[in-house]
Image (cartoon, helix red, strand yellow):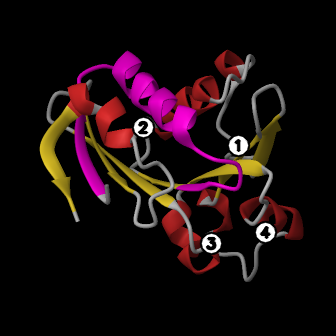
Amino acid sequence: MNTLHLMSPTLEATIQIGRLLGKCLPRGAFVALEGVLGAGKTQFVKGIACGLDEGGWAGLRSPTFTLMLSYHGGRAVLHHIDFYRLNESPELPGEILEAIHSDRAITVVEWADIWREVWPKNYVHVRIDVEDDSNKRRITIEDPTGLCPDLAKELDDYIVEPAGT
């Protein structure tokens, strides 16, 4: 599976899609999130945390002002990073670079396209677009290196276009 095109009709479905992705992510995975303000990126990360069996996922919040938050209750540490305020920065803080390249944690970055040059070789790219109906989201998941080989089967109920390459 390289690319999946999904439709999420509700916030709950967006969280569920994130949960199914989180279930399949191996340690060391990097997830790059894109989408406009209010697209549901943080809600999607809540789903990923739930898929990692992170018990405190309900309290998960956007790291916009702290830049990075880490959660330790699941099967792997979850680093949740936001590059939005780092757009003008000449370099990334060392602890963020360490988190991005950790082989023991799962790292999810909102606004990841701002610093694409630091993405590791193995990544999953998720783009969330708001549809005309403000509750619907079109979610595109690209997995170019096959980190989640069974994801298409797990997300079959949400697929709106056949998986592409």
Task: Residue 142 in the image: state x and y as whole percent.
Answer: 36, 58
Q: Residue at x 50, y 27 (%)?
A: 19
Whole-Å distance between the Cαs marked 3 and 1? 21 Å
Q: Could you say which quadrant of the image residue 69 lies in?
A: top right
Q: Is 129 above or below relative to 111? A: above
Would you say 34 lies left or right of 61 here?
left
Q: Secondary structure at mark 3?
A: loop
Q: Mark 4 or mark 3, which has the lower sequence index?
A: 4
Q: Secondary structure at mark 1?
A: loop
Residue 83 % position (x, y): 63, 60
Q: CA distance from mark 1 to mark 4?
A: 16 Å
Instruction: Kindly identify which residue carries mark 2.
Output: 38
| Rendered residue at 79%/59% (across/down) | 99
Q: Name the residue beneath numbered marker 3.
A: 120
Q: Which residues are magenta?
A: 3-31
Q: Of callouts 1 and 2, which one flags the residue occurring earlier in the amino acid sequence?
A: 2
Residue 44: which disc? none
Amino acid type of the residue that numbered disc 1 sits on in the rendered structure: Pro
Q: CA distance from mark 2 to mark 4?
A: 26 Å
Point out the tag, 3 or 1, that comes first from the N-terminus: 1
Name the residue at 67% across, 30% down: 61
Q: Is residue 28 visible?
A: yes
Q: CA distance from mark 4 to mark 3?
A: 10 Å
Residues at circles 1 and 2 in contact by the CB criterion of under 8 Å: no
**Is 71 covered by the magenta stretch?**
no
Give the residue pinned by disc 1. Answer: 63
Q: Is residue 8 magenta?
A: yes
